[in-house]
Image (tube, grey):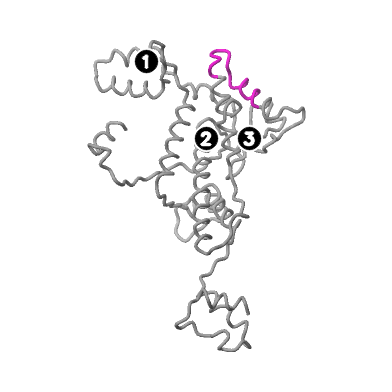
C-alpha cells in the first residue's frame, strides 16, 4: 500500500488544493458467532455513524437557519456512550483487552470476559449495564459471551474465540529472524513498515513497545474520522434486493436489515426529531389555499403571479 501511495502521490503535498477520495467500508456485522474482527468492524461503523449523525445535524441546522426556525429544542441521538463502552480507558472493552494482553501467559479470554462482567455488571443479579450498552445473561456469562447494543442492534460476542491472540498478533521469533536476515530488500522494507506500525515510539535508548492490534486500529480510525470531518462528504448506500441474484424479487426483511445496518433508519430518526414533513412555500400555498374559499381575492389572492410565495404563506396563516 505504501509503495502504491508513493507512486501516485504528488511530488509536493503543499501544492495540493483539493482532493477526492472514496471510502468503501464493511457493513455492520452480526453472525452466529462474533469475534474480534466483528467487534472492530462494528466499532468502525459506530464511529462513522456518529460522524454521519453530526453531518445530518449540521444539514438540519443550516435548513432551519435558512427558514429562521428555532432548532434549539431538537435533541439528536448520540451514540458516544457506546463508543466509550468499547474504547474508553480504563474500562472500555478494548482497553481492558489490552490490559489482559499485558499479563502475558497469565492473561486469557476467559479472565478478560470475567473482568468485563465484574466491571459492567457489578451487582449480583445484574444483566444489563447502567448505560444499557453492555449486557450478558447468567447463561451467557457462563459461556463467556457478552452483548453490545450498537446503533443497528444488539450483537453477542464470544470471548473465547481468540480475542487475546488476535489482539496481540505477534510475529513468531523464527519468522522475525527470517525477515531480518532475508536477502530481499523488498521483504526487509515490508517488514520494517510493519514493525514501525506495530511499535510505540519511546524515548531514545529505550526498546520500542509493541502496539496491540486494537491500539493500531483506534489510531487509524481516529485519523480517518479527522480526515472525513475536513471534507464535504457524500454518502452512497447500496442495497441488495435479494440473495438469489434474481430480477424483480425484493426481500422485505433483507432490505430492512440493510437499511438498519447501514444507518439509514438512524438518519431517518434524526430527521424525525425535527420537522420531518417539509413543503416549499409555493407548494404549501397551492395545496392549502382552497381551505379558505370565502376569503376575498384582495385579502388573499388565488394566483401567485407576481407574488412572493413566502409572503402569501404568511398572509394565509395570519388569516
Q: Nearer the viewer, residue 277 or 33?
A: 277
Q: Would you name the residue on which mark 1 appears?
A: 175
Query: What's the mark number on residue 83?
Result: none
In the picture, measured across the screen, residue 8 lies left or right of residue 50, that is: left
**Badge 3, how many Cα within 10 Å: few under 14, some, many 20+?**
some
Q: Would you name the residue on which mark 2 appears?
A: 38
Q: CA distance from mark 1 to mark 2?
A: 28 Å
**Magenta stretch in the rendered image:** 101-116
In the image, is residue 154 part of the stretch drawn in magenta?
Answer: no
In the picture, measured across the screen, residue 129 lies left or right of residue 179, that is: right
**Badge 2, how many Cα within 10 Å: few under 14, some, many 20+?**
some
SS category of the residue bearing label 2: helix
SS category of the residue bearing label 3: strand
Q: Nearer the viewer, residue 309 or 93?
A: 309
| Image quarter of residue 128 | top right
Residue at the spot x=51%, y=52% of the render? 56
Q: CA distance from mark 3 to mark 2?
A: 12 Å
Amino acid at each position: 500500500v505504501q509503495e502504491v501511495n508513493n507512486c501516485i502521490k504528488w511530488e509536493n503535498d503543499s501544492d495540493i488544493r483539493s482532493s477526492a477520495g472514496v471510502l468503501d467500508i464493511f457493513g455492520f456485522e452480526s453472525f452466529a458467532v462474533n469475534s474480534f474482527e466483528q467487534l472492530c468492524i462494528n466499532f468502525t461503523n459506530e464511529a462513522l455513524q456518529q460522524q454521519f449523525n453530526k453531518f445530518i445535524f449540521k444539514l438540519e441546522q443550516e435548513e432551519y437557519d435558512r427558514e429562521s426556525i428555532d432548532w434549539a429544542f431538537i435533541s439528536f441521538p448520540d451514540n458516544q456512550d457506546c463508543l466509550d463502552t468499547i474504547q474508553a480507558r480504563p474500562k472500555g472493552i478494548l482497553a481492558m483487552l489490552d490490559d489482559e494482553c499485558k499479563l502475558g501467559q497469565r492473561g486469557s479470554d476467559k479472565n478478560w470476559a470475567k473482568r468485563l462482567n465484574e466491571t459492567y455488571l457489578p451487582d449480583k443479579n445484574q444483566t444489563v449495564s447502567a448505560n444499557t450498552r453492555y449486557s450478558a445473561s447468567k447463561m451467557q456469562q457462563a459461556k463467556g459471551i457478552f452483548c453490545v447494543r450498537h446503533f443497528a442492534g444488539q450483537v453477542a460476542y464470544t470471548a473465547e474465540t481468540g480475542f487475546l491472540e488476535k489482539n496481540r498478533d505477534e510475529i513468531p521469533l523464527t519468522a522475525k529472524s527470517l525477515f531480518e536476515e532475508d536477502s530481499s530488500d523488498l521483504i526487509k522494507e515490508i517488514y520494517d513498515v510493519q514493525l514501525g506500525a506495530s511499535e510505540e515510539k519511546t524515548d531514545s535508548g529505550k526498546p520500542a513497545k509493541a502496539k496491540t492490534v486494537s491500539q493500531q486500529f483506534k489510531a487509524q480510525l481516529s485519523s480517518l474520522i479527522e480526515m472525513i470531518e475536513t471534507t464535504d462528504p457524500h454518502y452512497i448506500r447500496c442495497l441488495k434486493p435479494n440473495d438469489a441474484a434474481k430480477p424483480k424479487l425484493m426481500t422485505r426483511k433483507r432490505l430492512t436489515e440493510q437499511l438498519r445496518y447501514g444507518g439509514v433508519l438512524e438518519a431517518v430518526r434524526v430527521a424525525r426529531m425535527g420537522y420531518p414533513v417539509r413543503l416549499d412555500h409555493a407548494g404549501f400555498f397551492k395545496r392549502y389555499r382552497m381551505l379558505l374559499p370565502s376569503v376575498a381575492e384582495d385579502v388573499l389572492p388565488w394566483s401567485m403571479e407576481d407574488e412572493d410565495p413566502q409572503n402569501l404563506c404568511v398572509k394565509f396563516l395570519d388569516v
